[in-house]
Amino acid sequence: MTTPTSAGELLRLVRTGQATTRKALQERSGLSRSTLTARLDQLQAAGLLAEGGQEDSTGGRPARHLRFDDRHAVVLAASIDTTHAEAALTDLSGRRLAHREGELRVADGPEPVLGRIAAWFEAMLAEADRPVCGIGLSVPGPVEPGHAHVTRPPIMPGWDGYPIDAFLGPRFAAPVLVDNDANLLALGEHRTRFPDAAALVAVKVSTGIGAGLVIGGEVYRGIDGGAGDIGHIRLPGYPEARCLCGSHGCLAAVAGGGALAARLTELGLPTTSGSGVRDRILAGEPEAVRLAEFAGRQVGEVLATLVCVVNPGVLVIAGDLAEPHFVAGVREVLYKLALPRATQRLRVEIGGRGEALGGAVAMVVESVFSPASVDRELAARA
């Protein structure tokens, strides 16, 4: 591990709670007292660091706490699903200061959808008096790391390559970060509910199916953002199940909310989306419950392999179909097929609501206030 010496590294230690007093920072960094003081003064002058309150002392002068000033700017975040979206204005610790949500069809295309999101952002900003440090967006499609556009999304017609940052960035004079919803779900779950998990897998099962992986505290995206795309793993025995990607037998085409909605419709129970399937399950309709259990078993079969490969400590099931009948089906097959060594310490949890939104906020804060970004900002001020 490199010794943290820059102002940005010092802020990271304070922001993550690893060192919250001058003494602790000096011990971690190895800096002289005068150098440490000069760098902390820089951070305080930039509005990034605050000092106040005291630790209990067993002798001598009590140490004053240092904390990341989470009130000097705000984050705009939005989570777009196939038929619904929500947006939030938060402080830098993720506390919601304002919130909007409503029905919104991603298939309507980028400009109508982003226009609505922008209108929500503007309405929420009218209630705030702080600058926007960044915008985070969760989308139900593949995103190449470091790019603010979707790449060949199966369920997002018209979005391929669309410059989301060019639409939103100038409007709010802020950087725009975009990632896949499953990745941000995993990040949100890790940061808010399971921060000590060395490896976490979050599976979103709604109209489509995808997984996000957090390993060693970081989202693992693969070389071009394709990691965790389990919805397009092909299952044997379903050659008639045509997927939106053009292939046949994909997990999403067999067990996704869209596939279940189509089957319920064929059975005389008109259903249009994964959320509609969930409504029928919660209403106790036998066919919907049966299909949820069936779908859970199919997903469990794929997850048995993923769990053996990744060996996570936490597996989170989230999305429209994340309810007890579906999760029971996952558990039934997962524990039957996976190696006992891979599951003996595994926690299988139902995901919280809105964690992709929390992941979008975390993505922005961790990028904008990374040590390198902070050091560049301080150098520009000098």
Image (cartoon, rainbow, N blue to C red):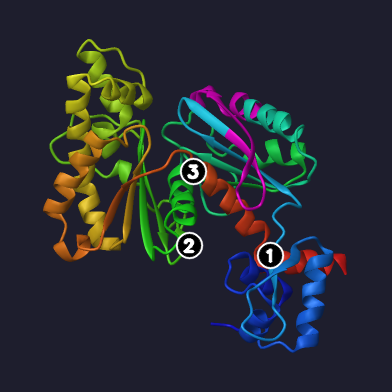
Judging by the rendered image, the residue that carries numbered circle 1 is: 67
CA separation in Å, label 2 and label 3 = 15 Å
Instruction: Name the side, left or right, on which 222 lies relative to 164.
Output: left
Q: Label 3's element?
A: helix
CA separation in Å, label 2 and label 1 = 23 Å
Location of residue 183 with respect to 375 vertically, above or below? above
- In which image quadrant can residue 115 be found? top right
- Do the CB atoms of the residues marked 2 and 3 lie less than 8 Å apart? no
Which x, y percent locates residue 206? 36, 33
Q: Label 2's element?
A: strand
- Residue 158 in view here: no
Q: For the point 58% across and 41% down, which residue is it? A: 137
- Residue 202 in view here: yes
Judging by the rendered image, the residue that carries numbered circle 2 is: 218
Residue 356 shows which numbered tag? Answer: 3
Q: Residue furthest front?
A: 59
Label 1 Cα neighbours within 10 Å, binned few <14 / some 14-19 / many ≥20: many
Which x, y percent locates residue 375? 74, 69
Q: The disc labelled 1 sits on which kind of residue?
A: Arg
Label 2 Cα neighbours within 10 Å, binned few <14 / some 14-19 / many ≥20: some
Q: Check if residue 36 falls in the magenta segment.
A: no
- Do the CB atoms of the residues marked 3 and 1 lie less than 8 Å apart? no
Q: Check if residue 95 falls in the magenta segment.
A: yes
**Looking at the image, is mark 2 or mark 1 nearer the viewer?**
1
Q: Quadrant of the C terminus?
A: bottom right
Location of residue 275 with respect to 232 vertically, above or below? above
Location of residue 273 with respect to 309 vertically, above or below? above
Question: In terms of depth relative to the viewer, which is nearer, 276 or 149?
Answer: 276
Question: In terms of depth relative to the viewer, which is nearer, 258 or 242?
Answer: 258
